[in-house]
Amino acid sequence: MVQPKKDATTGDCLGTGRRKTAVARVRLRAGAGKITINNRDYSEYFDVEGDRRNVVDALEATGHRQDVDVLVRVSGGGPAGQAVAIRMGISRAMLAYDSNTFAHLRGNGYLTRDSRMKERKKYGLRGARRGVQFSKR
């Protein structure tokens, strides 16, 4: 498990989340519940309701939705992978903000890294496992 981190200069709680090729760097600070992703509001950044739900899940599970401001820098992957990476980053930062939230976060699976990645292409094949079409003649 990753140790909770705090920024020494600003006092922000830090967390990094990953999913597939998406990487999210999260800063958590006391505030009014504003969530900013790549300098945009989270509801503007994510079009799909399920992705927006993934972002706020960890905050609502711990009861800190209105207490903290979240600043996120995310890159790589697609929207769904980015949303789950942000959720993991928020969960890790929440441990530094409030260590009593560990049981809620672990119980809901927010601290578990989803390690499934795309399988690499192998030589002699058209993809990871698909071979070339057999020709009898």
Image (cartoon, rainbow, N blue to C red):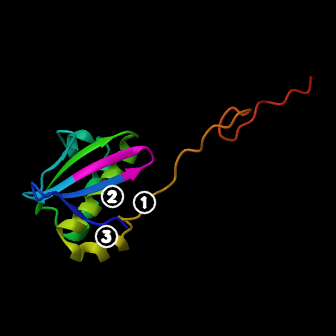
Q: Earlier in the sequence, mark 2 or mark 1?
A: 2
Residue beneath disc 2: 88
Q: Residue 36 or 7: which is nearer the viewer?
A: 7
Q: Residue 93 or 45: which is nearer the viewer?
A: 93
Q: Is residue 79 visible?
A: yes
Relative horizontal placement of residue 35, taking residue 91 as reference (left or right): left
Label 3 to label 2: alpha-carbon separation:
9 Å
Q: Amino acid at mark 2?
A: Met
Q: Position of residue 65 (x, y in %)?
A: 16, 62
Relative horizontal placement of residue 43, taking residue 54 as reference (left or right): left
Outermost residue, top direction?
A: 137
Main secondary structure along the magenta-highlighted residues:
strand
Residue in the image at 30% along x and 52% along y: 86
Instruction: Check the image and report above or below for 99 versus 110.
Output: below
Category of crowding for the residue at label 1, using alpha-carbon neighbours closer than 10 angstroms: few (below 14), some (14–19), many (at least 20): some
Residue beneath disc 1: 113
Q: Secondary structure at mark 3?
A: helix
Residue beneath disc 3: 105
Category of crowding for the residue at label 3, using alpha-carbon neighbours closer than 10 angstroms: few (below 14), some (14–19), many (at least 20): many
Residue 120 lies in quadrant: top right
Which callout, 3 or 1, points to the residue nearer the camera? Answer: 1
Mark 2 vs 1: CB contact within 8 A? yes
Q: Amino acid at mark 1?
A: Arg
Q: Secondary structure at mark 2?
A: helix
Q: Which residues are magenta?
A: 18-26
